């Protein structure tokens, strides 16, 4: 089993992600985080990159193709996209890219709000186990997680990121 010492440094991954994104994002790029970890990463990127567009946040729960298997969550959040989606240059941000299903759902959310000019994907960590043809444009690095487990991002004091591993069934 992977222990905390075997997990990548989430702060180092964030630094790598920010450096990659900084060179490719313009002042009018709209950052949109996927709840919850993706919003945390997007908040930090938005503050550091000083883009003009307001920060967006989306919840993909009701757009997922596996909601019947996963069940309804008690903590569904409101999606807020406080900018014109039509013709926007969007940077979609998430904490972990795994199967690609969350990203597919996120794209559906975005297109329900309008047709963006372009959507690029930035992730803090790539787990590399796709079920759909989804590839991140920007990644802070890889994360290895055993089958049946989830990589969970936490945000501690001062906004510092850290990884932990949890069983996929929530135990």
Image (tube, rainbow, N blue to C red):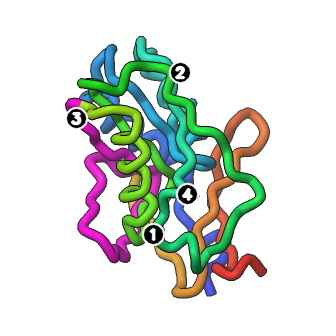
Where's residue 127, x and y in %? 42, 69
Element carrying mark 4: helix
Q: Residue at x 64, y 70 (%)?
A: 5
Residue 110 - label: none
Q: Nearer the viewer, mark 3 or mark 1?
A: 1
Disc nearer the start of the sequence (4/3): 4
Where's residue 157, x and y in %? 78, 38
Disc nearer the start of the sequence (2/3): 2
Q: In the image, is 120 to the left or to the right of 123? A: left
Q: Residue at x 57, y 38 (%)?
A: 79
| Spatial CA span between label 2 and label 4 | 29 Å
Where's residue 103, x and y in %? 39, 56
Disc nearer the start of the sequence (2/4): 2
| Spatial CA span between label 3 and label 1 | 23 Å
Element carrying mark 1: loop
Q: Which residue in the structure is indicated by mark 2?
A: 47
- Residue 126's quadrant in the figure? bottom left
Q: Residue at x 27, y 27 (%)?
A: 89
Q: Which residue in the structure is indicated by mark 3?
A: 118
């Amino acid at each position: 089993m992977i222990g905390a010492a075997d997990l990548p440094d989430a702060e180092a991954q964030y630094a790598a992600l920010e450096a990659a994104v900084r060179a490719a994002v313009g002042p009018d790029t709209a950052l949109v985080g996927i709840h919850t970890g993706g919003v945390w990463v997007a908040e930090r990127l938005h503050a550091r990159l000083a883009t003009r567009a307001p920060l967006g946040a989306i919840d993909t729960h009701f757009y997922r193709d596996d909601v019947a298997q996963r069940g309804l969550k008690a903590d569904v959040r409101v999606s807020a996209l406080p900018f014109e989606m039509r013709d926007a240059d969007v940077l979609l941000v998430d904490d972990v890219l795994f199967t690609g299903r969350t990203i597919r759902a996120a794209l559906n959310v975005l297109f329900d709000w309008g047709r963006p000019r372009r959507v690029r994907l930035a992730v803090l960590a790539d787990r590399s186990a796709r079920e759909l043809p989804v590839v991140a444009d920007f990644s802070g690095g890889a994360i290895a997680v055993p089958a049946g487990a989830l990589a969970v991002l936490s945000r501690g004091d001062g906004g510092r990121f850290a990884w932990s591993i949890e069983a996929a069934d929530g135990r």
